[in-house]
Image (cartoon, rainbow, N blue to C red):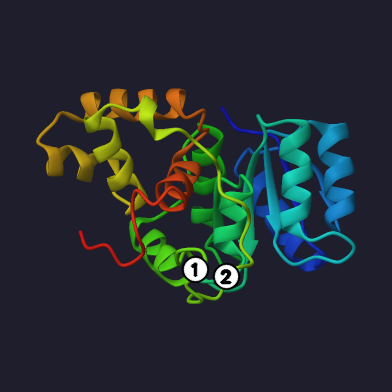
Amino acid sequence: MNPRVLIADDQALVRTGFRLILTANGIEVAGEAADGLEAVEAAAALKPEVVLMDIRMPNLDGLAAARRILAADPRIRILMLTTFDLDEYVYEALAAGASGFLLKDVTPEHLVASVRLINTGDALLAPSITRRLVEKFAAPAGDGSGAAAGTRAPALHRDLAALTPREREILALLGRGLSNTELAARLVLSEATVKTHVAHIFTKLTLRDRAQAVVVAYETGLVAPGDGD
């Protein structure tokens, strides 16, 4: 089922382009917003399933807008838009509750597939991007390294004691960007079993998706930046 989408970007050309691509593929664009404040108001009024949110906007940036939108309705999925694949705000966006991010020069096919993907409850986090992202920006608090050291969003506080040893192992691998297929191969389990474990982790830690799982794995110290595969 195609989701209803809200497009929030301060560039009219970007909004128009995305609208044309989405509508041409049967995805309804519920509305547009030119800044963060408009995005918050539009999300409350239009109740979209997915918000395409530019990180850098006037009046209220995409991070603050995402927090307000999710605080009002945590069922909304937010896909952040950025110009750089390692934008300094991407990790903070995930910590704020975003379900993933896209480069603005994304191909039409990838844009459509991404919107549909996060609407199903998954997160848009390619393993390679996840590893590069956390290695650069998820440095341990207080060590002075990483662009976001001392400035990133607060940790998602979760009690990992609720997890079984196997679930902790899987969460650590999720934090390093492994897909379900890779998890199954690594642990010699069926994909169905892996999906069940992942679902239990999400339930126990009250996580929405893999994006939040990555944040929790690093913020709790279960995985450290630079950990090898």
Q: Is residue 131 above or below residue 27?
A: below
Q: Quadrant of residue 17?
A: bottom right
Q: Nearer the viewer, residue 150 or 135?
A: 150
Rendering coords of residue 128 (x, y %): 34, 63
Q: Quadrant of the C terminus?
A: bottom left
Q: Is residue 196 above or below residue 113?
A: above
Residue in the picture at 52% in, 68% down: 142
Report the residue that reaches farthest toward the left. 188
Rendering coords of residue 144 (x, y %): 51, 76
Q: Is residue 166 above or below residue 214?
A: above
How much space separates mark 2 and mark 1, taking CA atoms? 5 Å
Q: Quadrant of the N terminus?
A: top right
Q: Amino acid at mark 2?
A: Ala
Q: Specify whether residue 29 is in view.
A: no
Residue at the spot of label 1: 137
Q: Do the residues under discs 2 and 1 have CB atoms within 8 angstroms?
A: yes
Q: Residues within 10 Å of mark 2 (few under 14, many from 20)?
A: some
Q: Amino acid at mark 1?
A: Phe
Q: Is residue 162 above or below residue 188?
A: above
Q: Specify whether residue 174 is in view.
A: yes
